[in-house]
Amino acid sequence: MGRYFRRKLLIYGLTFVIAVSINFAVPRLMPGDPVARMLTRNSVANIESSEAMRAYFNQLFGLDVPLWQQYLNYWAALFRGDLGVSVFAFPSPVASVVADALPYTLALLLPSILLSWFAGNALGAMAARNKLLDNGALPIGYVLTAVPYMWLAILLAWVGGIILGWFPVAGGYSFALTPAFTWTFIVDLLHHWVLPFLSLFVVALGGWAIGMRNLVIYELESDYSNYLQALGAPNRLVRRYAFRNAVLPQITGLALQLGVVVGGALVTEVVFAYPGLGSLLLEAVNSQDFFLLQGILLFIVIGVLVFNFLADIVYVLVDPRTRLGLEGGQS
Amino acid sequence: MSAEVVLQTEPVGRRGEHLYFALRNPKVAGGLAVVLALLLLGLIGPFFLSDSPNEYVGPKSEAPSGAHWFGTTYFGQDVFTQFVHGLRSSYLVGTLGGGIAFVIGLAVGFTAGYRGGLVDEVLNMVTNVVLVLPALAVLIVISSYLEVRGVVAQAVIIGVFSWPWVARAVRAQTFTLANRDYVDLARLTGKRSWRIIVHEIMPNMASYLLMSMILLFGGAILFAAMLDFIGLGPANAVSLGTMMQQSMAWSSLHLGMWWWFVPPGLAITLIVGALYITNVGLDEVFNPKLREM
C-alpha cells in the first residue's frame, strides 16, 4: 500500500511540476511577443511611453533576467502564493480573483459529478441484462455522452429559461440582490444553480450508466457469478456481488473522467454566464489576461490532482486487495 | 510459393467475414450511414454554396425558409452555408487531431509494452502524467497564446494531449502479446523489433485499434468544439463550435433564433453519437460472443 501511494504521489507531483512548467514555458516559447501584443492592445502610440511600458511589462513578467533564473523566480513566487496581478480585474491579485470564482464552480462540479456517478451507476446496473430497460437506456446513454456540454446547456437555457421561463438563464444570482446570508438570496442562488447543474449532470449520467452496464454484464458472466447461480443463490444476491465488483473500475474512471467534466463545467458556465472559473476564463481569454489565465489553469490542475488523490484513497478503502498489497489497484 | 498463397488467403477470409458481419450489423450500418452522410454534405456542399460562409447574403435574423434552409444569422449570413463549412472543419479536426493522438498513443504504447524495463517505467510515467492533466484547460492556455489560430494548429495541440488512454491500453495488450510463442519465434528469426510489432503484434489487436481510432476521432471533434466555443477557434474559418459561440454572443437565445444554435450542436451530437454506436456494433462484429445473430 505504501508503494501504491508513493507511486501515485510521485505521478501527481510530477504532473504539478509539468503543469507549472507549461504555464511558464508557453508564453515564452510561443511565437510572437506577448508584451508587444499587450502594448498594441492598449494602443500606445507614443514611442516614448511605449518604451516605458515595455520596460515595465518586462520587469513585471520578470523577463529581464536569464531564463533559468526566471524559472526559479516563477516557482518562488508560486510558493508565496503570488500569481501576479490580473489585467482584467486590475489591480486585484489573480489569487483573490480566482478564489472569488472558485466556490461557484465547486458548487456546480461536486454535486453534478457525485450525483451523476451514483445515479448513472444505479441506472446502469439496473439496465444490465434487462432487455426492456436496456433497449431504452443504452441509445439514450450514447447520445448523452456524445452531446457537447455547451449545446445541452444552450438547449436547457432555451427550453427552461426562455420558452418555459421557469429559470433564469444568466448569472449566479439576481443583479438586484447583493450577496448576503439571507433566505431570499439563498433561494435565488439555488434558482440560478439548477440549470447549469442539470446540464452537467445529464451529460455525465449517460457515460456512467453505459460503463456500469457493461461492467455488470461482464461480472455476471464471470465464474463466481455462475457458481453462485448454480448454488441457487437468489438473483438479487448475485447482482449485488456483480455490482460491488463493477464499482471498482468506475472509481478509477471517476478520477480519469475528471478533466473532461471540468472542461464541461467551464463551457457550461460560459453559456449561463455563471460567475465561476469558466466565465472568468472567458474574460481572461477575451482581455488577453495571461496572468489570470495561468492562475486559473493552476487552480484547476491542483483541484484535479487533489480529487484524483481522494479517489485513490477511496479505492484503497473500498478494495481490500490494495490494502493487503495483492493484485488490483496497480497504477 | 503455394505455402504463401495459403497463408495469405486466411486473413483475407477473416477480413471478409468481418466485413460481412459489419455491414449486416444495424448499429455499424446505421452509425456509418449517419457519419458518411454528414461527411458527404461537408465535402460536396461547399461546391454548391458560397465559398465565403461569412458573407452577408440575406435579410437579418430570418427563420428557415426555402431560400435559406437553416435561416440567417443576426447579421444576415446563411446558416446552412456556415453549417456545411463547419462540418468540413469538424471532420478535418477529427481526422487530424485523432490521427496524431492515435500515432503518438500507438508509438508510446508499443514501445513501452514491447521494450519493458526502464523505457516502460519512463513512458508509463509520462502517460500517467498527461492522463491526469486536465486537457481542456491546458489546451485553452496554449491556444490563447497562438498568434494565428487555424484548424490545423488546433488539431495538432488536441492530438498532442489526447493520446494517453490509447497508449495505456496498447501497452497493456502488448505486454500480454509480447510473450506469446509466435512472437518469440519471430524474434528468433532475427526480425527487427518494429517489424515484429507491426507484423506479429499489431494484427492481433487490429479490432481494438480501429475502435480506439473512432473514439479519438469523436473526442477530437468534441474538444475542438469546446475550444471554439470559448472563442479560441480558427480565426479564418467557420466551425460548428464558432457558430455556437457567435449565436450565444449575439443573444440568439433571447431573440428566439433557435435555427442558429440548434444545427451545429445537433450535427456534433449526431456525428459523435453515431460513432459511439458504430463502435458498439463493431464490438459485436469482432467479438462473436456478443453477436445477436
Image (cartoon, coloured by chain):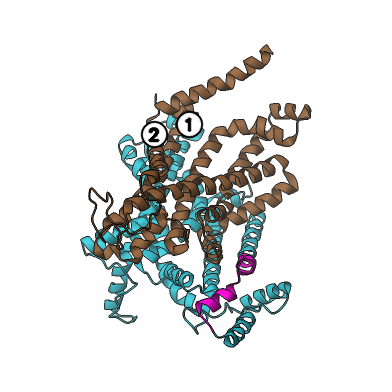
Q: Position of residue A244 (x, y in %)?
A: 46, 46
Q: Position of residue B70 (x, y in %)?
A: 28, 51
Query: Which chain's residue wears label 2?
Result: B
| Part of the protein shown in magenta | A20-45
Q: Position of residue B221 (x, y in %)?
A: 46, 50
Q: Position of residue A68 (x, y in %)?
A: 73, 72
Residue to which mark 1 is pinned: A227
Residue A150 in sight here: no
* Residue occupying the point 68% across, 30% down: B180
Residue to which mark 2 is pinned: B27
The one nearer the camera, A254 or B109, is B109
Q: CA distance from mark 2 to mark 1?
A: 33 Å
The one nearer the camera, A77 or A310, is A77
Q: Is residue A22 magenta?
A: yes
* Residue occupying the point 46% across, 46% down: B91
Q: Which picture quadrant has residue A54? A: bottom right
Figure chain in brown = B
Q: Where B180 falls versus B143 (above or below)?
A: above
Q: Which picture quadrant has residue A327? A: top right
SS assignment at label 2: helix
